[in-house]
Image (tube, rainbow, N blue to C red):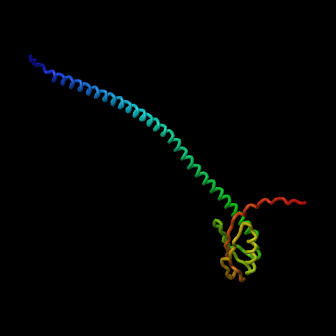
């Protein structure tokens, strides 16, 4: 006897298999979505943590920037004060040098043979204008100035004969270098045997 099965068994099996596949794809899809959600949440928490760290570091930077600005301001003030101290020291040296130079010029000027007309000092340069009885007086005056430890490089800039009060005198000018003497080295006591 021939049996005919009119029930669509194959189709039902295919539908059941397709439903199982669809359910497995759906479950894999949801698992994948869950994993992606967990990863996204983890990444979001990392980003939030980093944003908090950035906020804290910015606040720390602003706090330290005030200190850094203060340090920079103090360094500028220190440099200015050091510059001013250097200027004061230079002025002290310069004024001391001028006093010594004037003293040396006064000591070396023989008032019976040489008369100063003008004296000007600019930094380490000294210019003298004077009158003398004769050329020997000029030469002796230059030699006397050479003995000074404050005056050096004495050069006769000009010398002309000039009439003054019915006498023929020599009008001359000198240029010199001036500087403070170097401190003398302490001499070691000599041993006697």
Of 44 and 131, which appears nearest the observer?
44
Position of the C terminus, as image quadrant, is bottom right
Above or below, 128 relative to 1:
below
Residue drawn at x 64%, y 65% as measured from the top left:
123
Report the side of 63 relative to 179 (left or right): left
Above or below, 64 relative to 84:
above
Quarter of the image holding residue 90?
bottom right
Of 46 and 192, which appears nearest the observer?
46
Quarter of the image holding residue 187?
bottom right
Q: Where does residue 82 sit, x and y in percent of width and height?
A: 61, 52
Above or below, 34 relative to 115:
above
Above or below, 7 relative to 163:
above
Q: Where does residue 142 sit, x and y in percent of width and height?
A: 73, 75
Residue drawn at x 17%, y 22% as measured from the top left:
12
Of 58 and 116, which appears nearest the observer?
58
Report the side of 122 relative to 141 (left or right): left
Residue drawn at x 45%, y 35% as measured from the top left:
53
Q: Is residue 166 visible?
A: no
Report the side of 13 relative to 1 (left or right): right
Residue drawn at x 20%, y 22% as measured from the top left:
16
- Most extreme residue toward the left is 1
Quarter of the image holding residue 180?
bottom right
Q: Is residue 150 visible?
A: yes
């Amino acid at each position: 006897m021939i049996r005919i099965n009119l029930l669509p068994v194959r189709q039902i099996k295919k539908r059941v298999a397709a439903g199982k596949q669809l359910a497995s794809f759906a479950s894999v899809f949801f698992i994948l979505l869950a994993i992606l959600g967990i990863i996204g949440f983890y990444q979001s928490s990392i980003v939030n943590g980093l944003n908090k760290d950035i906020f804290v570091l910015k606040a720390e930077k602003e706090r330290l920037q005030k200190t850094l600005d203060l340090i920079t301001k103090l360094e500028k003030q220190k440099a200015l004060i050091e510059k001013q101290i250097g200027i004061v020291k230079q002025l002290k040296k310069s004024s001391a040098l001028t006093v010594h130079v004037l003293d040396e010029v006064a000591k070396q000027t023989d008032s019976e043979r040489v008369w100063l007309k003008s004296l000007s000092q600019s930094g380490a340069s000294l210019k003298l204008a004077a009158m003398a009885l004769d050329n020997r007086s000029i030469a002796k005056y230059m030699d006397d100035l050479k003995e000074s430890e404050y005056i050096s490089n004495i050069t006769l800039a000009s010398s002309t004969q000039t009439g003054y009060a019915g006498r023929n005198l020599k009008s001359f000018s000198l240029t010199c270098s001036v500087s403070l003497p170097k401190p003398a080295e302490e001499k070691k006591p000599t041993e006697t045997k």
